[in-house]
Amino acid sequence: MPSTSVPEQLQTRCINEDALYGVGTICHTKTNPAPLLDVSPATWWAGVASGRFPQPSHLGNRTLWRGRDLLRLIERICQGAETAPITSPRPAKSFEAAGQESMVQ
């Protein structure tokens, strides 16, 4: 990993490109106060579904991400090609999106 493209605080994290990482290691959880990325599990899954974050691999019943894919995501963030993953509030559903008729005529 080139030292010029990744900030020093991320270099100390030691992400092994050949390792597999679960959501509990990548995201903020009750049991992980020091995640790899500053993102909630809900935001992570939304990013995976939209294609913004890497697609997972499956090992048995576990869903995991390759270290090399996480390193590529971090490098894209550091180079400004991707905005930093942050938690954000969910948009409110409209009446139409919820399958209900609008009460405004």
Image (cartoon, rainbow, N blue to C red):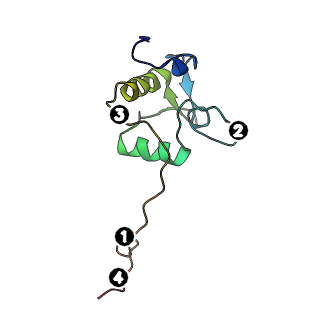
Judged from this view, the residue extending furthest toward the left is: 105
> Residue 48 at x, y = what percent?
42, 41
Q: Which residue is mark 1?
A: 97
Label located before the other in sequence (4 or 3):
3
Which quadrant does the C terminus fall into? bottom left
| Relative depth, front residue between 86 and 47 | 86
| Relative depth, front residue between 28 and 17 | 28
Query: Label 4 near label 2: C-beta < 8 Å?
Result: no
Q: Nearer the viewer, mark 1 or mark 3?
A: 3
Count residues near mark 1 (Cα–Cα under 10 Å), then give few for <14, some for 14-19, many for 20+. few
Label located before the other in sequence (3 or 2):
2
Residue at 56 percent across and 29 percent down: it is 36
Q: Which residue is mark 4?
A: 102
Q: Which residue is mark 2?
A: 31
Label located before the other in sequence (2 or 4):
2
Residue flagged by tag 2: what amino acid is it?
Thr
| Relative depth, front residue between 67 and 80 | 80
The answer for how far apart the CA atoms under marks 1 and 3 are is: 29 Å
The answer for how far apart the CA atoms under marks 1 and 2 are is: 35 Å
Is residue 28 shown above or below 19? below
Residue flagged by tag 1: what amino acid is it?
Ala
Give the numbered dot on residue 82. 3
Count residues near mark 4 (Cα–Cα under 10 Å), then give few for <14, some for 14-19, many for 20+. few
Among the 4 quarters of the image, the one containing residue 49: top left
Residue at 35 percent across and 40 percent down: it is 51
